[in-house]
Image (spheres, grey):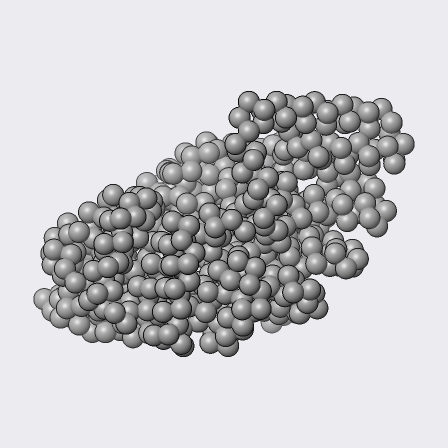
């Protein structure tokens, strides 16, 4: 492999070249060590927690003037931060900020939590708020610098680090950060001077050597890079990252036996980092140990069935040994998780052709060519396939297109041959690619592990740790419904006060408390039985009081909960006839009609079924980049009556937030995203903490290409407790 490629590959495939790490503690607070694509994780998670706890204890005196309840909430929030409950920690710091917006501490700690969730813009903004309240909060300069560095704002990051060095000129983490900023700016001489100062002052500082090795790789100096890695291992032979980095470098230098030994040791020291298994699989592949390579990929998939790299590589290996059907299943999974992965489509097309499924092969090739209209190799492949399917006219057409596109490529190469020469040299010198490299010409290359995509959470709870690493689908939050039963959220969300709901519960005197929720709980057998008994009870009472709208409403709720939508609608119609201005009757009828429509859709398309009891919108996509818009089969006419219902509700009460929210959901289903955004915005205006509205407005904005505003909405939704926001933010920022 060319040395020029070494840096680009190595910095993306190990656990410590990207994202956050908390490393050192000074009197002024916590220093954050991180930089995009070129940082080294300096400590293990347990050590990080110790430092966080220490700074939390130290800074607990800073808010001594606050009331006891605020102090307690801050303490609980810091404890949550220590235990890596970042989302929960944000909830507590939100409470303090609401109660005491003039304090600097909660903004700093919330910034730290957002930083650990890869919400770098949010972290930068909160750190700035902290410094606005206390310009001498040194740790906030370091944190803001790291957040800026991860957004490629290198000059601004350097300014923050320089400010920190004015307070503590020998802070080793700030010195490292300054060095890396200059590496990113291609100012290698300046970076080298910072490394020199650092290692002269701290000669046994392992992360310094690890980081400098990456600078040497950037400069194509693999000899110096190897020397630094050797020194790091000599100083501390118990750091997995050092062995992993050296193993990757030796892999790139084709020293496969040495690479295998280093990756074995890295796995022994840190058996939970999946990237090492993936890269060891590559080494074993080069050593012709296909069984061993397969075992490493199997191991990763056993613990994380959605690991794209392991799935892709195992698919290629299975194809190589002739296990085509199982190879297809691996690529099926890759495409399911990453629908825009055209390289996977191309590999699956060839495998389908191998097993004789010409139609499936053609379908996959069509997807590839549609996305890559200048991919002449694809036209040649499709031409041959069509010829085998006796579509001679189509075969000839594709052949001519292939010739034309190939001629265009040759002409461009003649005018400017250098890029093509470099591409050819790279192709000849490497048989692996990075996951981010979606060059269709590299369809048969194994993928090296990217640390951030290979890092698996050690927590079972979906809200703990680095939730941004969970591959969350881009599913909008469901509609709000009327019910008596609500599932608990793992992370508390804001409670929205509704005068309408409060008044209804005080006046209607139903058997259960009415709730407006988008987290509806399914009924158990006992609950179903109780509602059937309630239906009978209401029916008996209606015999003696047939014009009581409350009785009809109560029975309608029971009918809805046991999914007898037809009778529920009849009772609600009776309520509205008797009391046309009963808002909740209109709302319940809109909900029942939506449920009935959803049920009808499921009868025709079972794949549309959602996992929850409430109504869910179709998936917008689950890949990095712009979301994939849904194909909505439901006709607009199906929603006319529901939309009229919401219009009636808003005439009765123009401040009923759930009507705006639910109507926005309907507009989204009809792909009228701008109308949806307008309704979500109105709901947010009426309820500034409406987390679900922020989340869905963010998705709607992403759908129409308003990425920056969409991500801002998702940041707010994450701050308010919608965990999956951070997964989307990470993939799209």
Q: Looking at the image, which is closer to me, 473 or 564?
A: 473
Percent of width and height locating residue 631: 63, 38
Percent of width and height locating residue 473: 54, 51
Q: Which residue lies at the image location 40% right of the left edge and 68% below the top edge?
A: 230
Percent of width and height locating residue 23: 29, 67
Q: Looking at the image, which is closer to me, 526 or 508?
A: 526
Count of numbered circles on the image: 0
Q: Residue furthest front?
A: 223
Q: Is residue 475 left or right of residue 532?
A: left
Q: Which residue lies at the image location 34% right of the left edge and 74% below the top edge?
A: 235
- Visible residue check, residue 620: no
Image quadrant where residue 304 sits: bottom right
Q: Looking at the image, which is closer to me, 165 or 563?
A: 165
Q: Which residue lies at the image location 24% right of the left edge and 44% below the top edge?
A: 156
Reply above or below: 363 against 143: above
Percent of width and height locating residue 44: 38, 71
Reply above or below: 241 against 350: below
Q: Is residue 117 left or right of residue 388?
A: left
Q: Residue furthest right?
A: 390
- Visible residue check, residue 24: yes
Reply above or below: 618 against 216: above
Reply above or below: 287 against 500: below
Q: Looking at the image, which is closer to me, 679 or 291?
A: 291
Image quadrant where residue 399 sits: top right
Q: Which residue lies at the image location 59% right of the left edge and 39% below the top edge?
A: 424
Name the image quarter holding the C terminus: top left
Image quadrant where residue 680 sits: top left
């Amino acid at each position: 492999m060319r040395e020029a490629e070494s840096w680009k590959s190595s910095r993306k495939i190990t656990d410590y070249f990207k994202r956050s790490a908390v490393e050192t503690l000074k009197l002024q607070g916590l220093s954050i060590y991180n930089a995009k694509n070129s940082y080294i994780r300096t400590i293990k998670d347990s050590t990080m927690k110790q430092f966080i706890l220490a700074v939390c204890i130290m800074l607990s005196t800073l808010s001594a003037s606050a009331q006891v309840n605020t102090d307690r909430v801050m303490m609980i929030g810091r404890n949550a931060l220590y235990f890596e409950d970042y989302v929960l920690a944000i909830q507590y710091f939100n409470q303090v900020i609401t109660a005491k917006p003039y304090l600097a501490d909660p903004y700093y700690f919330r910034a730290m939590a957002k930083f650990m969730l890869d919400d770098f813009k949010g972290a930068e903004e909160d750190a700035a708020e902290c410094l606005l309240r206390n310009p001498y909060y040194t740790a906030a300069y370091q944190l803001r610098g790291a957040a800026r560095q991860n957004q490629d704002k290198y000059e601004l990051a350097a300014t923050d680090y320089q400010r920190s060095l004015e307070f503590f000129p020998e802070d080793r983490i700030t010195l490292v950060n300054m060095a890396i900023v200059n590496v990113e700016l291609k100012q290698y001489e300046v970076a080298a001077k910072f490394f020199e100062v650092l290692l002269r002052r701290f000669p046994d500082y392992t992360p310094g050597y690890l980081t400098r090795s990456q600078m040497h790789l950037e400069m194509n100096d693999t000899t110096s890079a190897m020397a630094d890695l050797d020194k790091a291992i000599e100083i501390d032979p118990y750091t997995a990252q050092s062995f992993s980095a050296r193993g990757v470098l030796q892999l790139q230098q084709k020293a496969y036996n040495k690479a295998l030994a280093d990756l074995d040791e890295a796995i022994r020291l840190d058996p939970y980092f999946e990237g090492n298994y993936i890269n060891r699989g590559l080494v074993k592949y080069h050593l012709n140990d296909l069984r061993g390579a397969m075992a490493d990929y199997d191991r990763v998939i056993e613990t994380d069935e959605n690991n794209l790299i392991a799935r892709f590589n195992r698919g290629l290996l299975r194809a190589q040994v002739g296990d085509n059907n199982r190879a297809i299943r691996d690529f099926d999974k890759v495409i399911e998780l990453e629908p825009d992965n055209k390289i996977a489509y191309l590999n699956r097309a060839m495998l389908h052709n191998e097993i004789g499924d010409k139609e499936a092969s053609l379908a996959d090739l069509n997807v590839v060519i549609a996305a890559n209209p200048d991919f002449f190799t694809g036209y040649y492949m499709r031409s041959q396939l069509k010829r085998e399917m006796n579509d001679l006219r189509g075969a000839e057409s594709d052949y001519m297109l292939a010739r034309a596109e190939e001629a265009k490529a040759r002409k461009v190469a003649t005018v400017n041959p250098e890029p093509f020469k470099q591409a050819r040299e790279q192709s000849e010198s490497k048989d692996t690619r990075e996951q981010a490299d979606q060059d269709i010409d590299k369809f048969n290359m194994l993928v090296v592990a990217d640390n951030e995509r290979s890092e698996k959470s050690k927590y079972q709870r979906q809200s703990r740790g680095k939730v941004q690493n969970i591959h969350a689908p881009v599913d909008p939050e469901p509609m709000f419904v009327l019910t008596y039963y609500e599932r608990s959220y793992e992370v508390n969300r804001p409670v929205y006060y509704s005068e309408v709901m409060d008044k209804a519960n005080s006046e209607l005197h139903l058997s259960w408390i009415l709730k407006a929720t988008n987290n509806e709980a399914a009924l158990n057998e006992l609950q179903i039985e109780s509602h059937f008994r309630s239906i009978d009870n209401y029916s008996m009472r209606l015999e003696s009081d047939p014009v009581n709208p409350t009785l009809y409403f109560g029975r309608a709720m029971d009918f809805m909960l046991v999914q007898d939508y037809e009778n529920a609608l009849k009772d609600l119609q009776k309520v509205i006839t008797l009391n046309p201005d009963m808002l909740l009757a209109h709302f319940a009828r809109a909900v029942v009609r939506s449920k009935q429509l959803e049920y009808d859709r499921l009868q025709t398309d079972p794949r549309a079924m959602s996992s929850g009891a409430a109504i869910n919108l179709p998936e917008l996509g689950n890949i990095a980049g712009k979301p994939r818009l849904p194909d909505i089969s439901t006709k607009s006419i199906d929603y006319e009556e529901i939309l009229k219902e919401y219009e009636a509700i808003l005439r009765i009460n123009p401040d009923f937030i759930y009507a705006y929210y639910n109507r926005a959901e309907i507009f989204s289903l009809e792909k009228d995203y701008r109308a949806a955004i307008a309704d979500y915005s109105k709901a947010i205006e009426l309820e500034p903490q409406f987390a679900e509205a922020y989340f869905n407005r963010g998705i709607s904005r992403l759908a129409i290409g308003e990425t920056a505003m969409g991500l801002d909405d998702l940041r707010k939704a994450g701050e308010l407790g919608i965990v999956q926001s951070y997964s989307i933010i990470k993939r799209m920022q």
